[in-house]
Image (spheres, rainbow, N blue to C red):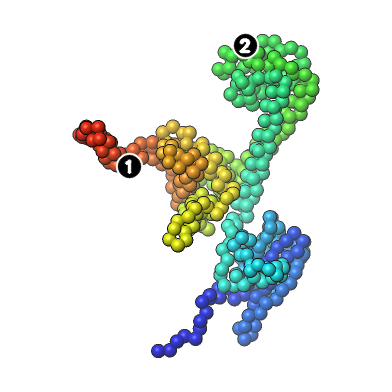
Amino acid sequence: MTKNKDTTTISIVHPVCCGLDVHKKLISACLITLDIEGKEQSEIREFGTFTDDLITLRDWLLKNKAPIVAMESTGVYWRPVHNILEGYIKVILVNARHIKNVPGRKTDIKDSKWLASLLRHGLIRGSFIPEKKVRQWRELTQLRRSYTRSLGDYKRRVHKLFETANIKIDSVVSDLFGVTGRNLINLLCDHESQLELDSIEDCARGSLKSKVVELHRSIQGFFEDHHRFQLKTLMRTITAIEDEIASITERLTNLMEPHQDLLDRLDDVPGIDKVSSQSIISQIGVTLDDFSSENALSSWSGLCPGNNESAGKRKSGKTAVRKHPLKMIMVEIAWAAIKKKGSYYKVKYYQLKSRRGAKRAIVAIAHRILKAIYYIIKHGKTFNDLGEDYLRRKNRVKNFNSLKKAARQFGFYLLPIQGCQ
C-alpha cells in the first residue's frame, strides 16, 4: 500500500488573487500569481484613492488576470474601490473581525498579504453587497430614516417649548401635530393678542369639537414673543424636513414601481406598511439569491440565536450581530404587528413574554416575520395569518391533559364534549 505524499490539508481555491487593505488616502495591494513553473509569486504595490489611481489599480489587476479581490476597509472607504472594480473583477468585502492577523508586527502591507493568503485558500467569508439599484434604494431609505429622527427631535423641542410657556395642548389632544394640534400651533404663531373661544372652535376637528372649552384653557399660559419666535423657527424646520421626507418617499416609490406587486404582498404582513416595505427590500433586495435559506437571512440580520458551545455545555446564545439596520427595522415592525387584533403574532408574543420577557419575545416575533418575508420574496408566496386560535388548536390535546391533571388534584374528572372543537 502506497501513501500519498501530498499532505496538504488546505487546498488552493484561487491561484491568482489580490488582497487590498483600504484606507482613506492609501491602498495597500498584494497580488498573488503563478510563474511559468507554477510557483507562487507575490507582488506588493501601494495606490492612492483618487479615481485615476483606482483606474490604475484596476488596469494592473486586469493585466495580471486577477479574477477576484478581497478588501478590508474602515467605514465607507471601500465604496470608491468597488465603484471602479464592479463589473470587471469579483469583489469580496470582508469583516475586519473575521480575518485578524497574528498579533504583533502589524503594517498595512502585512495586512494585505495576510488577506491575499486567506483569499487564496478560500478562508474568507464575504459581506453581502447588493446590486447597484438596491444600494441606491438603501441610501435613500437611510437618508429618510435620518430625517425622520431629526423630525422627532424637533417635535420634542416644540413639546418642551410649550411646557416652558405653560401651554398644555398635548394634554388634551392625543397628537400635538395632528390637524387640530397644528391649527392651534398656527394660531399661536399668527396671533399676538389673547385668543378667543371662537378662534379655538374653528381649529377643532372631529371629536375634539366637544372639547373646545378645555382646548381654550390649555393655551392660557405665558406665551410671549420670545416663545413665538422660537415656535415659528421650529415649525419652519419641521415643515422643511417633512417636505424632504415626502420627496424621498416619492422618489423611492417611482424607483420601486416595477416591484409594486412585491411591495403589496409585503404590505399584507401585520406591522408592515408602505415605508417599512420599502425599507426591507432596500436592505435585502428583491431576489435573495445570496441567502440559501431563511435561516441564513436571519443569521445575517442578527435575529436568530448564536451558537456558543464548549465541552458539551451550551453557553450564552447571544447573536454576534449586535447592531444591524434590518434588525432595527424588523423589531419596529414586530412592535406594530403585536398590536393587530386577531393576529397570530400578538398571541405568540404574549405567550413568549410570560416565559422569556418582553425584549426577547419581540426579537423572536421579528425573527418569525423575517422568515415569512423570505418566502414572500424568494418564492413569491402571499401572507396568510394563522390567526389567534392557531396555538390553542395546535396545543388542544396538551392543554386538555394539563386541565385534566389539575382537575384530578381537586377531586374532579374532566371529559371532552362530543362534537365540540
Question: Which quarter shows the C terminus?
Answer: top left
Tell me the SS state at disc 1.
helix
Q: Is residue 256 above or below residue 417?
A: below
Determine the residue positioned at 49% across, 52% down: 317
Tell me the SS state at disc 2.
helix
Bin the neighbour count of mark 2 within 10 Å (Cα to Cα): few under 14, some 14-19, many 20 and up. Answer: few
The amino acid on which the numbered mark 1 sits, given as a three-letter code, is Lys
Instruction: Specify whether residue 69 is in view.
Output: no
Residue located farthest toward the bottom when viewing the structure as drawn:
1
Please tell me in which quadrant of the rendered image residue 352 appears: top left
Q: Does the CB distance between marks 2 and 1 fall below 8 Å?
A: no
Image x and y of residue 308, in percent: 49, 57
Left or right of 49 on screen, residue 155: left
Image x and y of residue 261, in percent: 50, 44
Q: Is residue 343 above or below residue 81?
A: above
Of residues 182 and 87, which is closer to you in this image? 182
Q: Is residue 382 above or below residue 189?
A: below
Q: Which residue is mark 2?
A: 213
The amino acid on which the numbered mark 2 sits, given as a three-letter code, is Val
Bin the neighbour count of mark 1 within 10 Å (Cα to Cα): few under 14, some 14-19, many 20 and up. Answer: few
